[in-house]
Amino acid sequence: MVYLDYNATTPLDPEVVEVITETLTTAWGNPSSSHEAGVKAKHVIATARQQVARMVGAKPSDIIFTSGGTEGNNWILQTALQHFCRGSSKIGLSMGDWNDAKSARNRPHFITSNIEHDSIKLVLEHFLSTGLADVTFIQARPLTGCVHVQDVIDAIGPSTIMVTVMLANNETGVIQPVSEICQRIKSLKRKKGETERILLHTDAAQAIGKIPVDVQELGVDYLTIVGHKFYGPRIGAVFAHNPGEDAPLYPLLFGGGQERNFRSGTENTPMIAGLGKAAELVSSNLDKYQTHMATVRDYLEESLQQTFPDSVSLNGKSPDSQRLPNTCNVSFLGTSLKGHEILSRAVSVQASVGAACHAGDRPSHILLSLGIPETVAWRALRISVGRETTKEDIDLAVQELKSVLDS
Ligand SMILES: O=C(O)CC[SeH]
């Protein structure tokens, strides 16, 4: 059996398992308690916060732990909506005006891409359908799989409150020009002398652990971190630049006031410790991980092209855009089988036809949005390699696919 779906989720690194297991029995105290058991747990959390912060070039105080990427993305979008509301109330609009957010003059405007994960896409579609906000979905360009920076800039309007573009797409692996987008927006605001900030966010779920991610280099106000994409546990974190001061941050959850009142709920100390260890491993080994995954992914693509000459199409691969080192999206042109039918026959290959949250009962909307014909999108597989994937694994997988497609 060959596992080739690391963009869906990764196994826990053995060192992460070790830290989690140890923390379960040595730091079980309530981190809010002032006695020794609580202080011990609090210290574990502080160490993990430092490790996660170091991984993304942030200060520890900029990191707030969450249950995962979906919570993080929802939280940041809701924060932007609230920030607009509070700003509106400051500029003389009463809550009554805000409740009447249906009138365009009171509506915040979000800009995002059309290739985001559902935890961004569906939230913004909800804001749009309920009249709480206007949303511009920037079309990623078909040939490159990238959003164009100028398209983002051209979409900015007087009520634009947030721009959110994922750092790398989960299905094609195409890396988005987030740093350039942020730079252009900041310089635009400086030139116009406008004070009203446009909040900048990126969902870095698929990028962390595969390419360097540095919040200062990106220039974002917020960034979403997802543990189970980089051999960590199924929790996450958000980066917010000086939360509550530079980057507004309003609680989604109210309760015991944990995480400096930003995110209430007794902390999941063992999993936070595991997230910290996973982050430490990324900080220490990223170059090695990145090089290995790129080598194996490139070997996969060479093998596919040699095994299926002129009958495979590599979706998202373009000389004009960069991809994550571990991701291959390939369509098989010489078969009547659809991607999910290929996988159901290739019993020793564990890959996907796209995002795990989409069952595969329809072609990937990401591929369709890139202008890939439906017949080609239907026959796509998303194959994502990991830190331990070997060339022997690739040989086994390609042979299995050959036996299925030759039959
Ligand atoms: O499988 C993926 O692309 C991420 C989880 Se929906």
Image (cartoon, grey):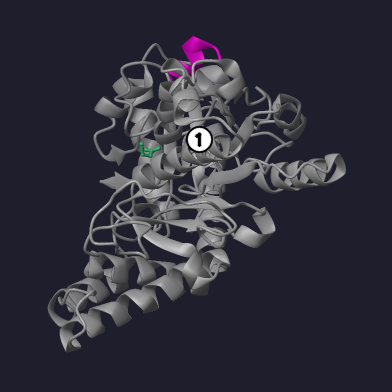
374 falls in the magenta region: yes
In the rendered image, which quarter is residue 75 located in? top left
89 falls in the magenta region: no
Q: Secondary structure at mark 1?
A: helix
Q: Nearer the viewer, residue 118 or 174?
A: 118
On the rendered image, what quadrant is the C terminus found in?
A: top left
Q: Residue furthest right?
A: 191
Residue 71 location in percent, x, y?
A: 35, 45
Query: Of helix, strand and loop, which mostly describes the magenta segment?
Result: helix
Residue linked to disc 1: 85
In the rendered image, which quarter is residue 34 located in? bottom left
At 56% across and 50% down in the image, what residue appears?
A: 325
Q: Seen in the image, is 119 located left or right of residue 149? A: left
Residue 300 location in percent, x, y?
A: 50, 43
Which range is magenta?
Answer: 372-379
Q: Is residue 316 visible?
A: yes
At 39% across and 11% down in the image, what residue appears?
A: 336
**Crowd rating for badge 1 (residues with CA inside 10 Å; few <14, some 14–19, many 20+):** many
Residue 31 location in percent, x, y?
A: 23, 75
Position of 214 relative to 269 (above/below): above
Amino acid carrying mark 1 in the image:
Cys
Residue 329 location in percent, x, y?
A: 50, 33
Q: Nearer the viewer, residue 269 or 6?
A: 269
- Which quadrant of the picture is home to ligand 1? top left
Report how many numbered discs are placed on residues in the image: 1
At 36% across and 72% down in the image, what residue appears?
A: 277
Q: Seen in the image, is 10 located left or right of residue 79? A: left
Position of 255 relative to 145 (above/below): below
Position of 136 relative to 21 (above/below): above
Q: Nearer the viewer, residue 209 or 179?
A: 179
